[in-house]
Image (cartoon, rainbow, N blue to C red):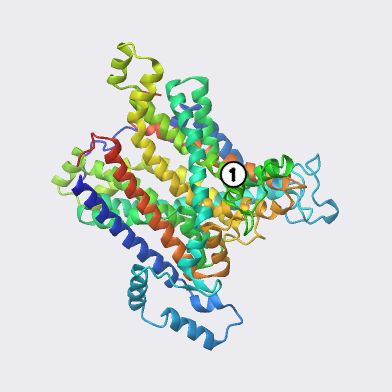
Amino acid sequence: MARYLVERAIGMVVVMFIAVTVVILIVRLAPGDPAAVMLGPDATPADIIALRHQWGLDQPLFVQYVQALGQIVRGDLGQSIFLNRPVLTAILERTEPTFLLAMLSLAIASLIAIPIGVFAAYKRGSLFDQGVVALAMLSASIPSFWLALLFIQFFSVRLGIVPVAGYGGPGANFLDRVHHLLLPAFTLGLLSSSLIIRFTRSSMLDVLNDDYIRTARSKGMGEFRVVMRHAFKNALIPIVTVLGLTVALLVSGAVVIETVFGLPGIGNLVVSAVLRRDYPVIQGALLVITGLYVLINFLIDVLYVIIDRRVRY
Amino acid sequence: MNAPATPSALVTQPGVLALLLRRPTAMIGLVIIVVIALLAIFAPLIAPIPPGKLSVVHRLTPPGPIWFFGTDEFGRDIFSRTLYAGRLSLLVGACVVAIATVLGLVLGLLAGFFRRLDTPLARIIDALMAFPDVLLAIALVAALGPSLLTIIITLGLVYAPRLARIVRASTLVIRELPFVEAARALGVPAWKIILRHVLRNLTSPILVQSTFIFAHAMLAEASLSFLGVGVSPEVPTWGTMIASGRQYVGQADWTILFPGLAIVLSVLSLQMIGDGLRDLLDPKLRGQM
């Protein structure tokens, strides 16, 4: 098991190294001069030269790459001129809304999807099952921003039960902040539930056909116990995988949802950075999010070993 | 030397249409997307009012007999604009699929067929897949500058690794099959084996994956355009229509309702086709349907 984990850890480092290289190159291989683009049409040639020098853009590409890589390894993601602070600080300041949004959405998605997926598999081929499959496909086809706008109109404007947007202002307490996150998390959770429903359903279908389920039934064991104790427990591995995948999707979804609901999270930071051409922030945010995604995948692999005792490496 | 005459396809594959006929949901999906494509292609003949025609007197008019889908904040006919916007949204999807397929096919075939290239290429594919799709697209658009062409190239690059992974996995299996081994033993050059035998067996997984990429690309393009980092707001796509209707949603929800429904219908129909094809072409699922 230790060897397996070491191999996976090395794999993770390699993937992260390639991802970092891609991120560094995306900004530096862009056509035109990033410094000139960032400073805008009013910048003087001296300003542009100064910024080029500060970023090391006047160096050969390989030197720039090595310098950037060294900085990233030391945890230095650079400085944002627009925000007037280090990129890492700017990202950390905005972590809470994104983290809470992702966790709340994941909880909502799991609460909706897992029971529905289990029951749909148990009632395979029934009207309920077919309805669930159709609804899962429909929810995967809805643009999040569109549903968010319709939900704001209905839940916030018409019913007035949740705030329209924002994160409760600077003095807001934790409960108030969570209250502001309810509708964004519900929107994101609902749309992310389709993948979990499909995986839970198909994973349960696989398990329910196994011999030991028939044995459990033939012993006269109650249906609830058969499904929950024997089948669901063994169907968990693919479900854990898909929960990990869903976190990655949630981060992507958060970019859009945070913008619609005006939440001061990392997603919102990235979109405003793109509109301002704030390259250090774009690079930093992309690195942090990708790093998180790679780490989550690694943790899922570790969880495999813990959940399934048959998995021995 | 000629390749073995025996058919190398794993399963003799009937035409896509014949396959789709066996799955009613996939067939319904195909009919919906064909109708949407025809409406978009023949938009100049069908649209009752030119899409750019302003009529400030009739701004934000609700749907009715003259303006089927109502009018927007400039009094433009939303029905006509939705038809025209479909052209660009579908075009983006189709071009993205073309780019992702070519790139993904080359990457996946090289990784899957040549053992030496497998480890480095597989790692690169893994690393590229570690980026959330919309986020990577946003970063690339930021670097390359927003335009329709950038969006197409960017999304093509974003989805290529997804196709490459499928192609690689299938190629790894096909490479070990007896007919490939036989061709190799007969001295058939690698490129001929790839073109004649491997590629032919990759049609099904590529077809299924491309359909899903088409659907995802349409959703991603709409998201990017909505966020303002995609095509210019003046260019009518379903995403930009929703973005511009956003501020009027309180008084005129039809400004976002119909372009949104167009996206949902298109993406849903593509998913129905993809799902149906996957069920039909996946040998593991054969017979269970």
Q: How crowded is mark 1: few (under 14 residues within 10 Å), some or many (20 or more)?
A: some
Q: Out of B43 and A196, give the one closest to the viewer.
A: A196
Q: Name the residue located 82 percent from the left edge and 55 percent from the top edge.
A: B55
Decide if residue A247 is on the left or right side of residue A255. Answer: left
Q: Name the residue located 65 percent from the left edge and 59 percent from the top edge.
A: B235
Residue B47 at what x, y percent from top left?
A: 72, 47
Residue B99 at what x, y percent from top left?
A: 44, 55
Vertical arrangement, residue B135 with respect to residue B21, above or below? below
Residue lying furthest right: B57
Q: Name the residue located 45 percent from the left edge and 52 percent from the top edge.
A: B98
Decide if residue A83 is on the left or right side of residue A58. Answer: right
* Residue B41 visible from this viewpoint: no
* Residue A150 visible from this viewpoint: yes
The total of numbered circles placed on residues is: 1
Vertical arrangement, residue A276 with respect to residue A255, above or below? below
Residue A173 at what x, y percent from top left?
A: 60, 52
Q: Element type at marker 1?
A: helix
Residue A42 at what x, y percent from top left?
A: 61, 82
Q: Name the residue located 33 percent from the left edge and 68 percent from the top edge.
A: A73
Residue that badge 1 annotates: A182
Quadrant of the image occupied by residue B74: bottom right
Badge 1 sits on which subunit?
A
Amino acid type of the residue that numbered disc 1 sits on in the rendered structure: Leu
Q: Out of B84 and B225, give the one closest to the viewer.
A: B225
Q: Quadrant of the C terminus of chain B?
A: top left
